Amino acid sequence: MLRTMGTALGQTLIVMPAYNESQSVGRVVSETRAILPDITVLVVDDGSTDGTADAARAAGALVATLPFNLGVGGAMRVGFRYAAQHGYRAVVQIDADGQHDPATVTGLLDRLEDYDIVIGARFAGEGAYVMSGPRRWASKVLAWTISRTAGTKLTDTTSGFRASGPRAIELFEREYPAEYLGDTIESLVLACRAGLTATQVPTAMRDRSGGAPSHSPLRAAVYLARATLALLFAYARPKAVAPRTIEATA
Amino acid sequence: MTLRAYIFGIVAALFVLIVVVSLLRHRRLRERHAAWWLAAGVLALLAGIFPESLTWAARVTGIELPVNLVFFVSITILFLVSLQHSAELTRLEAKTRDLAETVALLELRLRELGEAPRPPSEEEGPDRHGDAHDEG
């Protein structure tokens, strides 16, 4: 059993957005619950048509089923609303395709002692994750810009592996963006501009059990354009109201 | 301008106004969406009845051909309506998304309480209430 010095596992909610992931979701949920025994896993079934909800439920997860597909942003909003309603003190977002290692969750939670958001960063030393072409430029520009806002060096701003503490939960329950890339870029910019703190922990990624990421240069260019636009709009929006400081529980 | 063209302008404007008002009356169009169309209809009617007003307005704005003023105003109104629709669509999407999230959470809550509705295919006997009474 893994232990964490930070937020107790019993107060931590794993949120797993899943869209047609019936092949992998059951195994990922089982693995997560085996490694982190006291943890609650909430799978947000994002309008799947392949029995993702049943597979997740059979593996012992709570399942919230969206009536139609909303994208990762919408799914995460459900997760944050659930966490806020039930008083969880940490939310950890994990992909349902098995690319995030549940054993590294405790590493993220430990850092939540001092930060509001902890990102599991892919290319910060651990693992062999490589990008090329426009996608890499995009991620560099994003990382540089958001690092400046956050006041710390962040190298992987589009990672879908991150932990949010109580203040972040309170903010995201109200304001989590549902736009394209809202779950990664905009949520981070929003949080940092509202005065929340962020840091990253190097994390190795495993191979996805589902499909391979696309390497088409055209798609990468479109991604670059959309990411830039998402970033610009994230800064153009009015600042979110900062969450009230939650008194530290000793 | 021929008399026929004069009458045609007025009839066209009246037609627009009648359609808008009748949709409004039957609640098929909300006031806030109808405002632009009403404004357009009234403007068209005024320009139809008093063509000199159009000539005057064109001179004031420095437009040489009055007809260009008509095009300009028409396009502007269409543009604004279209923009309003996009904004409205965004609002509706946000509301729908919010409802979908709430439904998902409520369904989860129901399940936690052990009252999750099962899909009819899983039910064996005809134990749905109401079946026995309604027919006949």
Image (cartoon, grey):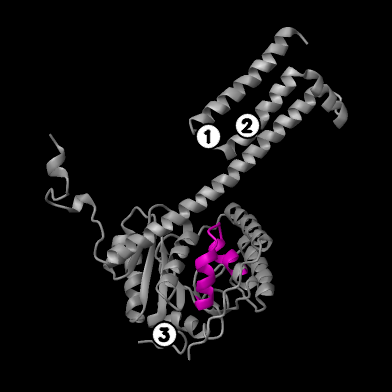
**What percent of the width, then of the height, locates residue A226?**
62, 55
**Depicted B53 relative to depicted A161: above or below:** above
Q: Nearer the viewer, mark 2 or mark 3?
A: 2
Quarter of the image holding residue A188?
Answer: bottom right
Quarter of the image holding residue B5?
Answer: top right
The residue identified by callout 1 is B29
Q: Residue at x 17, y 45 (%)?
A: B130
Q: How far apart are labels 2 and 1 at the CA level?
A: 11 Å
The residue identified by callout 2 is B37
Task: Label 3: state its secondary structure.
Answer: loop
Q: How far apart are labels 2 and 3 at the CA level?
A: 60 Å
Q: Residue at x 33, y 77 (%)?
A: A33
Asked if disc 2 and disc 3 are in contact, CB closer than 8 Å, the reply is no
Q: Extreme front residue here?
A: B25
* Amino acid type at image mark 3: Ala
Asked if disc 2 and disc 1 are in contact, CB closer than 8 Å, the reply is yes
Residue closer to the observer: A163 or B84: B84
Q: Nearer the viewer, mark 3 or mark 1?
A: 1
* Amino acid type at image mark 1: Leu
Residue B129 lies in the magenta-colored region: no
Mark nearer the N terminus (2 vs 1): 1
| Residues marked 3 and 1, same chain | no
Residue A230 horizontal side relative to residue A40, left or right: right
The residue identified by callout 3 is A8
Q: Residue at x 45, y 72 (%)?
A: A84
Q: Extreme top residue here?
A: B3
**What percent of the width, then of the height, locates residue A59?**
29, 69
Q: How far apart are labels 3 and 1 at the CA level?
A: 55 Å
Asked if disc 3 and disc 1 are in contact, CB closer than 8 Å, the reply is no
Task: Label 1: state its secondary structure.
Answer: loop
Magenta-colored span: A164-189
Q: Quadrant of the N terminus of chain A?
A: bottom left
